[in-house]
Image: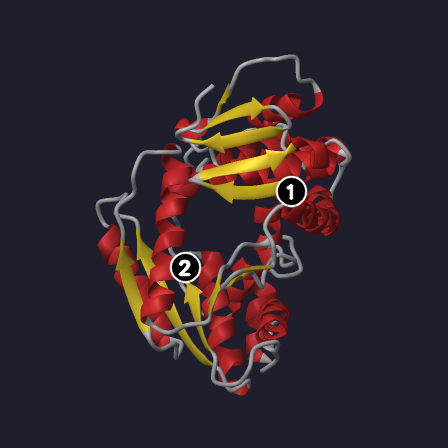
């Protein structure tokens, strides 16, 4: 980026002097910190679109993985949303192979409509990554989300009025997914690509204002930086990390409470209100959310308003009827218990 410490000029000077560009060093360091926890012989896959962030991740992984005794490949998800998407995917796959990653697979998916264009593409992408990991016997999939992506996620959560878990942003590790770049600025991945002579693909969707995240990136964050001064992105990402620690602790306490409060019978989830009455709201609502999810609600459709309505069956019971939840799930209080399921009757 012009005027930044990771500028093109600095990259050219570093290469001419035979020095490792600081942006390349930063990306490798981040990947090494993530991969060093894995046992030798582990297969890792880089989720690579061919864009700046994922290409920088592919290059850093190709360099670091062999040194740690790991097998590194890549998967390129072709969402089929653009006329030349198959060509773009093949170019990305070839770049991964040229870096030394193997195996490399292109995974074509069909993107549905449920959850909006961004949500539907995300669901299709993550399903494809899990399928690819199964087929290629990979234990870890690396994602290239950066510190900027984390800041955008926090702002999106604030705009929705979300709770601590959503404001905690993306986790560095969840299941087989790892995000080495969550503390790495987007400017650094761009500089790393330039310094390494890589040619990233620019996704036109990243400039399309119909997508909420694009508007946050190009309109909201610049206004915040102008009004509050530099460092907003870093501060938002730091906030996510602080909230994640709190949310993790609360989730564990809620999981312990759920062991006592929830039971499963005849396709229904049953909550003991007597147990929940003694729990603070932060724990109680988490247990009720878990109950709704286990009953069949999708996390993307279950809102804080839904959970609050079920919580009223516990804390403000006045004989009200059932609560309708997403996916046809119903919550009904019967005496000292609340039953949740698709076949629950009032």
Question: x, y (%) of residue 128?
Answer: 34, 56
Observer-nearest residue: 114 or 218?
A: 114
Q: Residues within 10 Å of mark 2 (few under 14, many from 20)?
A: many
Residue 257 shows in this picture = yes
- Residue 105 as seen in the image, left or right of residue 66: left
Picture quadrant of residue 10: bottom right
Picture quadrant of residue 236: top right
Q: Residue at x 23, y 55 (%)?
A: 86
Label 1: which residue?
A: 165
Q: Residues within 10 Å of mark 1 (few under 14, many from 20)?
A: some
Question: x, y (%) of residue 45?
Answer: 42, 69
Disc 2 versus disc 1: nearer the observer:
1
Observer-nearest residue: 190 or 264?
A: 264
Q: Residue at x 64, y 70 (%)?
A: 22
Residue 217 shows in this picture = no
Q: Is residue 24 above or below residue 285?
A: below
Q: Secondary structure at mark 1?
A: helix
Question: x, y (%) of residue 174?
Answer: 55, 58
Of labels 2 and 1, earlier in sequence is 1
Q: CA distance from mark 2 to mark 1?
A: 33 Å
Q: Is residue 47 above or below residue 275?
A: below
Q: Is residue 56 above or below residue 250?
A: below
Observer-nearest residue: 242 or 11?
A: 242
Observer-nearest residue: 20 or 41?
A: 41
- Residue 74 as seen in the image, left or right of residue 334: left
Question: x, y (%) of residue 327?
Answer: 40, 30
Q: Secondary structure at mark 2?
A: loop
Picture quadrant of residue 93: bottom left
Residue 200 badge? 2
């Amino acid at each position: 980026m012009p005027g930044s410490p990771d500028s093109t000029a600095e990259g050219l000077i570093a290469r001419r002097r035979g020095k490792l560009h600081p942006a390349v060093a930063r990306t490798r360091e981040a990947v090494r910190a993530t991969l060093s926890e894995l046992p030798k012989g582990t297969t890792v896959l880089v989720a690579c679109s061919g864009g700046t962030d994922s290409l920088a991740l592919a290059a850093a992984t190709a360099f670091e993985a062999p040194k740690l005794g790991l097998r590194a490949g890549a998967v390129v998800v072709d969402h089929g949303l653009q006329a030349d998407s198959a060509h773009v995917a093949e170019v990305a796959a070839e770049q991964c192979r040229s870096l030394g990653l193997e195996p490399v697979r292109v995974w074509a998916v069909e993107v549905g409509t449920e959850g909006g264009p961004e949500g539907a593409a995300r669901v299709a992408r993550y399903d494809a990554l899990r399928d690819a990991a199964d087929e290629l016997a990979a234990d870890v999939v690396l994602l290239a989300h950066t510190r900027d992506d984390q800041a955008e996620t926090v702002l999106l959560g604030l705009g929705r009025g979300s709770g601590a878990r959503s404001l905690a942003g993306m986790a560095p590790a969840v299941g087989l997914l790892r995000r080495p770049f969550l503390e790495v600025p987007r400017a650094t991945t761009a500089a790393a690509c330039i310094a390494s002579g890589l040619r990233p693909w620019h996704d036109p969707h990243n400039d399309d204002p119909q997508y909420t995240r694009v508007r946050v990136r190009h309109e909201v964050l610049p206004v915040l930086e102008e009004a509050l001064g530099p460092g907003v992105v870093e501060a938002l990402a730091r906030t996510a990390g602080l909230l994640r620690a709190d949310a993790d602790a609360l989730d564990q306490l809620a999981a312990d409470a759920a062991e006592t409060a929830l039971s499963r019978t005849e396709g229904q989830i049953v909550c003991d209100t007597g147990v929940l009455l003694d729990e603070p709201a932060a724990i109680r609502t988490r247990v009720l959310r878990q109950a709704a999810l286990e009953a069949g609600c999708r996390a993307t459709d279950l809102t804080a308003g839904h959970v609050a309505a079920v919580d009223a069956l516990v804390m403000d019971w006045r004989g009200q009827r059932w609560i309708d939840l997403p996916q046809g799930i119903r919550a009904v209080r019967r005496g000292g218990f609340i039953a949740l399921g698709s076949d629950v009757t009032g």
